[in-house]
């Protein structure tokens, strides 16, 4: 599946770069929304056909929260590592890492303070989303189901959800949606905090 | 953002309700996986088109692409590592944890 994903992505990038006129960009947003809504509807159909999902998740209880908590702590630890590698402001690196794949929001908040870090935030979170898409089949097969959510982070409630569902199962799909919502909320809190500390 | 989350939740809930009531024909349910795959590849293709047409991304890749790539790799890797370590101690249900048996 990873190969097919890479091919689809590469074809898309090439088409966008070589063939698509500028006006295409705005319409792709609408197409993505439609495609995403359809996929979420199908994920809902999958969930409805599995009667034991909520019983199984009830048994997990608050342990479900280890996925968003681990994802946030891991991203922040990654930010600290990157600040050491590139010798950049630690709060700037933490702000970038707190984007957790939500590239539009993190870049918009960081750019007024530093356009360079804002661009890194934008690009690194785009890369993280693409990386998650490509790596999720491998992660699900070789590492574990819950780690597929950690890879994509905030996208686990929308664009990443169909990928997680396709490569894991209905229980993990529900955990993915819940985690994605929590992680998206965390982005709105963490990025401004670190940007504030950076300024 | 709240509206978007509600919309996604609403769509999931509609799908769940229709399926749980058995309204969808069994034959269609069997085809859902294939339909999902087709839409998924379409979505990834469109994502690629967006990247390919976005001058901001293309212009930045040359300057700071490596730094951004390292950020993406390290943050994703550390998140995976933290979740892997935390789940090992707390969740034993292999249907949820997955991975190599």
Image (cartoon, coloured by chain):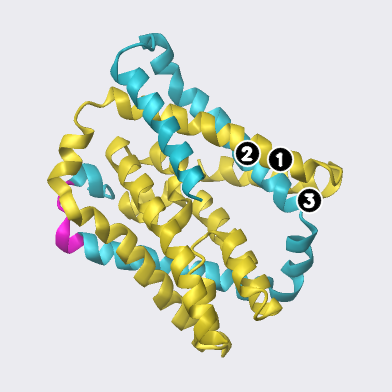
Chain colours: A yellow, B cyan
* Residue linked to disc 2: A32
Q: Residues within 10 Å of mark 3 (few under 14, many from 20)?
A: many
Residue at mark 2: chain: A
Determine the residue positioned at 45% across, 82% down.
A80
- Circles 3, 1 touching at the beta carbon (< 8 Å): yes
The residue at the far front in this view is B3
Residue placed most toward the observer, B3 or A178: B3
| Residue B78 visible in the picture | no
- In front: mark 3 or mark 1? 1
Stretch in magenta? B88-93
Residue A6 rendering spot, x and y as whole percentages: 60, 47
Image label count? 3
Instruction: State how far apart marks 1 and 2 are (Cα).
Output: 6 Å
| B36 horizontally vs B25: left or right | right
- The lab-note entry on whether marks 3 and 2 share a chain reads no
Determine the residue positioned at 26% across, 57% down.
A65
Residue at mark 3: chain: B
Determine the residue positioned at 45% across, 31% down.
B11
- Circles 1, 2 touching at the beta carbon (< 8 Å): yes
Task: Say if A87 sits above or below A157 in the image.
Answer: below
- In front: mark 3 or mark 2? 2
Instruction: State how far apart marks 3 and 2 are (Cα).
Output: 15 Å
Residue at mark 1: chain: A
Residue A94 rendering spot, x and y as whole percentages: 48, 78
- The lab-note entry on whether marks 3 and 1 share a chain reads no
Residue A165 rendering spot, x and y as whole percentages: 39, 38
| Image disc number at residue A28 | 1
Task: Say if B73 sits above or below B33 in the image.
Answer: below
Look at the image and say whether residue A90 sits in the magenta stretch: no
| B76 horizontally vs A103: left or right | left
The quarter holding residue A25 reads top right
């Amino acid at each position: 599946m990873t190969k097919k994903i890479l091919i689809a992505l590469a074809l898309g990038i090439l088409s966008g770069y070589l063939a698509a006129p500028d006006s295409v960009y705005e319409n792709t947003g609408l197409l993505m929304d439609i495609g995403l809504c359809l996929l979420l509807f199908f994920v809902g159909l999958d969930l409805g056909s599995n009667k034991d999902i909520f019983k199984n998740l009830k048994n997990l209880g608050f342990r479900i929260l280890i996925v968003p908590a681990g994802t946030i702590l891991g991203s922040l630890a990654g930010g600290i590592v990157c600040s050491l590698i590139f010798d950049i402001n630690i709060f700037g690196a933490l702000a970038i890492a707190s984007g957790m794949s939500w590239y539009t929001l993190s870049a918009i908040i960081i750019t007024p303070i530093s356009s360079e870090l804002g661009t890194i935030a934008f690009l690194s979170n785009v890369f993280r989303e693409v990386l998650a898409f490509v790596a999720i089949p491998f992660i699900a097969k070789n590492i574990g189901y819950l780690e597929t959510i950690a890879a994509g982070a905030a996208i686990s409630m929308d664009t990443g959800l169909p990928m997680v569902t396709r490569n894991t199962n209905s229980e993990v799909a529900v955990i993915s949606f819940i985690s994605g919502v929590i992680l998206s909320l965390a982005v709105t809190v963490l990025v401004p905090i670190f940007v504030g500390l950076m300024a | 953002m709240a509206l978007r989350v509600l919309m996604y939740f609403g769509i999931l809930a509609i799908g769940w309700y229709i399926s749980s009531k058995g309204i969808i024909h069994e034959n269609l349910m069997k085809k859902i996986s294939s339909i999902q795959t087709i839409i998924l590849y379409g979505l990834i293709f469109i994502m690629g088109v967006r990247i390919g047409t976005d001058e901001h991304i293309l212009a930045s890749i040359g300057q700071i692409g490596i730094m951004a790539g390292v950020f993406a790799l390290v943050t994703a890797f550390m998140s995976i590592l933290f979740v892997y370590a935390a789940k090992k101690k707390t969740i034993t249900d292999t249907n949820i944890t997955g991975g190599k048996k």
